[in-house]
Image (cartoon, rainbow, N blue to C red):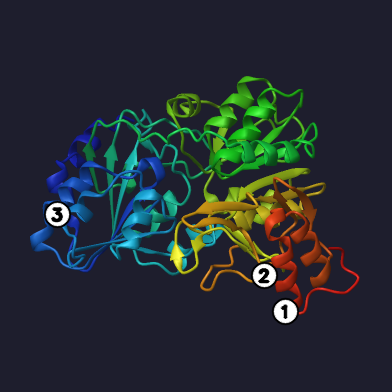
Amino acid sequence: MDYTQEYASKLVTAEEAVKVVKSGDWVEYGAFAGQVVELDKALALRKDELFDVKIRGTSRMSMPETVKADPTTEHFAYNSTHLGAIERALSDENRAWHLPVLYHEQPGYYRRHIRTDVVFLTVAPMDEYGYFNFGPQVSHAMALCETAGAVVLEVNPHMPRCLGGFEEGIHISKVDSIIEADWELPQLPPIVPSETDQKIAQLIMDRLHDGDCLQLGIGGMPNAIGAMIAQSDLRDLGIHTEMFVDSFVDMIEAGRVTGAKKNIDKYKVVCTFALGGKKTYDFIDNNPQVAFYPVDYTNDPFVIARNDNVVAVNNCVEVDILGQVCSESFGTRQISGTGGQLDFTYGAYRSKGGRAFICMSSAHTKKGGMVSRIKPTLTPGAVVTVPRTMVHYLVTENGVVDLKGRTLWERAEAIISIAHPDFRDELIAGAEEIGVWRRSNRR
């Protein structure tokens, strides 16, 4: 069947397409590298005739024109399920708001709880069967389309065609209108690992084995692990992750990854979104080795656990001596989101032979001097991203500790043992004050 006529009948200008938005609507912008650009510009031009339009996105890589057009937020209010750098700055100015999510549940939020009046999504060009591919933002895209009052697509020839999996695309029959755009995908600047990142990465490398199935988060330390793996002699690694990043390309091209030991999605690299540089977008384009799934599959802890020897590696902001992990806020200041850290910490531990690592430098430098990332209690207002009951391995440049099955006093001793030496006495005093230090504890 030829869908060119239907395509032509639904093709409009961006200015025409955004007329579907009404005052008071909730409008979705998509996620990560795939968030709309031309539709955002056109919607911004309607500022004076619209009020209280609520926009949702996820880790947007460029400043929305709607936000620029309305510093008062009277007309457009931007919301994000995971703050990127731009959204973080807007949040600090009370011009953007965070929507907390447990990432593997996010599609279900749309299907069960969240109102969506209009969804704007960037997609790859239509294929001969009438399908538009969601590109590297499969995540919760289909749930958006299923529940929205209107679906408007921004077709971009630079969007990689990311194969499934499932729920990786939408048929033209489900689409209300289409516009055409031509912009390059935003690229994530490379993060150079620090000396501390390298030390932490080496501690984790010492605990990796042939056939492990990997999830890596974002940042200098996961990048360091990826580089070390690419240069190692590890064999038959698998990948089941939420985010596909540049370091995975290096590992795959070095021959470290085959997926031969996976129990599910054997030989496939599994992810739900991709964010990186040009080499990542080129690698995933039309590549049958990489399977994009919705996040309620990739991040479901029970799906994760179906593979053996899952290794999850994620960063955090701070930890207290009881093992509570904060990875998304500085006190009450929201800086990112829960993301998939809780999903993979739980899923990796449930995996036969699995290991979940939560990593951080033991201290960091602020104005006025060095500050410990390990605290007697979390900074007031800090969000508990991973509860103490779920933490498996905690890692700093000073060592690795396993917190499973440990009493509060054993936890305190173990965590303090990997703190920066300059803060250990202070942390012991804090442990004594809250009653989790025994006289038999080592000092």
Residue type for callout 3: Lys
Residue type for callout 2: Pro
Position in image of residue 281 (x %, y %): 44, 29
- Closest to the camera, between mark 3 and mark 2, is 2
Residue labelled with disc 2:
376
Answer left or right for 306 relative to 177: right
What residue is rendered at 34% in x and 61% in y? Answer: 91
Real-space Cα separation, disc 1 to disc 2, in angstroms:
9 Å
Q: Could you tell me which quadrant the N terminus lies in?
A: top left
Q: Quadrant of residue 135?
A: top left
Position in image of residue 224 (x %, y %): 62, 34
Asked whether the beta carbons under mark 1 and mark 3 sit within 8 Å of each other, the answer is no
Farthest residue, direction left: 48
Q: Earlier in the sequence, mark 1 or mark 2?
A: 2
Residue 113 position (above or below residue 292): below
Answer left or right for 159 relative to 332: left
Position in image of residue 127 (x %, y %): 36, 29
Residue 224 position (above or below residue 92): above
**Exactly how many numbered labels are in the figure?**
3
Does dot 3 land on a helix, a strand or a loop?
Answer: helix
Q: Mark 2: give few (<14), some (14-19) or many (20+) Cα within 10 Å.
A: many
What residue is rendered at 75% in x and 40% in y? Answer: 203
Give the number of the disc on residue 433: 1
Give the number of the disc on residue 19: 3
